[in-house]
Image (cartoon, rainbow, N blue to C red):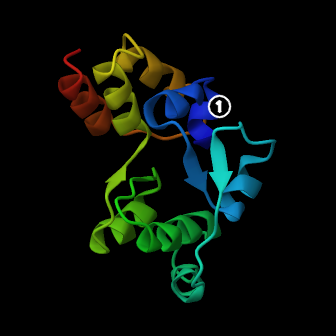
Amino acid sequence: MILLEKIGRIALLESLFGKITVTSVIADEFGKTLPDFIEIEDAEDKKYQQILENILDAGEASAIALALEKDDCLLIMDESKGRREAKQLKIKLTGTVGILIFAKEKGLIQSVTEIIEQIRRTDFRISETLIQEAKRKSNE
């Protein structure tokens, strides 16, 4: 979410999903007023979040804890340690690049590659392998 905001593409989330939910920790990390389509909700049971905070940062831990409480949830996460934990817990998962591929499939963007180039100009690290996979999946 933060990365999409950095490159001026946060509206893709609303176009793809309508409302999305983030935790209060992530809302704080966002650092500014959230767009109206983003709702804030925290996990009811904080035990798992507290355990995860021993190995992940608070944002990832809170997101995974909330995802565990939700049925049919898609977790959007780019951080590799958090993604590994989410996969082990069988949480449905995608990242920013997956969102871009989905947006192209829905006709919301013309080029995944062009937006990946915008991402590369930020402080976000993206592997060449992931870039090539994104190009292949988006037929670019």
Q: Is residue 81 visible?
A: yes
Image quadrant in which the N terminus is located: top right
Q: Is residue 122 visible?
A: no
Snapshot quadrant of residue 11: top right
Whether 91 is drawn above or below 2: the answer is: below
For the residue labelled by badge 1, is the local secondary structure a helix, a strand or a loop?
A: helix
Whether 128 is drawn above or below 108: the answer is: below
Q: Is residue 45 left or right of residue 127?
A: right
Where residue 39 sits: x, y (%)? 65, 51
Q: Amino acid at mark 1?
A: Lys
The residue that appears at 20% across and 28% down in the rendered structure is 137
Q: Nearer the viewer, residue 56 or 102?
A: 102
Q: Nearer the viewer, residue 22 or 133?
A: 22
The residue that appears at 57% across and 53% down in the rendered structure is 21
Where residue 65 sits: x, y (%)? 50, 74
The residue that appears at 46% across and 20% down in the rendered structure is 115
Where residue 97 sits: x, y (%)? 38, 35
The residue that appears at 57% across and 84% down in the rendered structure is 45
Q: Which residue is mark 1?
A: 6
Snapshot quadrant of residue 70: bottom left
